[in-house]
């Protein structure tokens, strides 16, 4: 992992884009980390990254985890059985 000040990033952005293909590049400002350059290899990488940093999505996942912990979740086999039964009733 590389660490570079924002001035270096601005001056040699293309170089750091290549570097982030190998490992993340931490960008600093006044000696403090402020951002990270990460390579995106495909659409799935991009989707995971965006979702991981979307507050509403995280809230939904946390709420689902709480419901499961409280015993209010749906078992895996029940979910798929329910899905199959809705497909059977589709006109």
Image (spheres, rainbow, N blue to C red):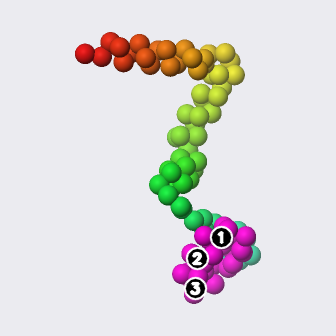
Q: Tell me which corner region of the image, top left, top right, bottom left or bottom right, holds residue 22.
A: bottom right
Could you tell whether 83 is left or right of 48 in the image? left
Q: Nearer the viewer, residue 84 or 74?
A: 84
The residue range painted magenta reads: 1-28
Q: State the residue position of label 3.
A: 12
The answer to whether one can see residue 35 in this image is no
The answer to whether mark 1 and mark 3 are in CB contact below 8 A is: no
Mark 3 vs mark 2, foreground winner is 2
The answer to whether mark 1 and mark 2 are in CB contact below 8 A is: yes
Pick the quarter of the image with the C terminus.
top left
Q: Which mark is residue 22?
A: 1
Based on the picture, tell me whether residue 29 belongs to the magenta stretch. Answer: no
Where in the figure is residue 58, as x and y percent of width and height? 58, 40
SS type, badge 3? loop
Q: Nearer the viewer, residue 48 or 80?
A: 80
Where in the figure is residue 55, as x and y percent of width and height? 55, 44
SS type, badge 2? helix
């Amino acid at each position: 992992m590389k660490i570079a000040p924002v001035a270096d990033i601005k001056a040699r952005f293309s170089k750091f884009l290549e570097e982030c293909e190998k490992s993340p590049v931490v960008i600093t400002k006044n000696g403090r980390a402020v951002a990270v350059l990460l390579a995106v290899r495909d659409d799935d990488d991009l989707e995971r990254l965006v979702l991981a940093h979307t507050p509403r999505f995280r809230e939904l996942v946390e709420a689902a985890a709480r419901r499961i912990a409280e015993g209010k979740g749906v078992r895996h086999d029940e979910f798929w059985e329910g899905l199959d039964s809705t497909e059977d009733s589709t006109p």
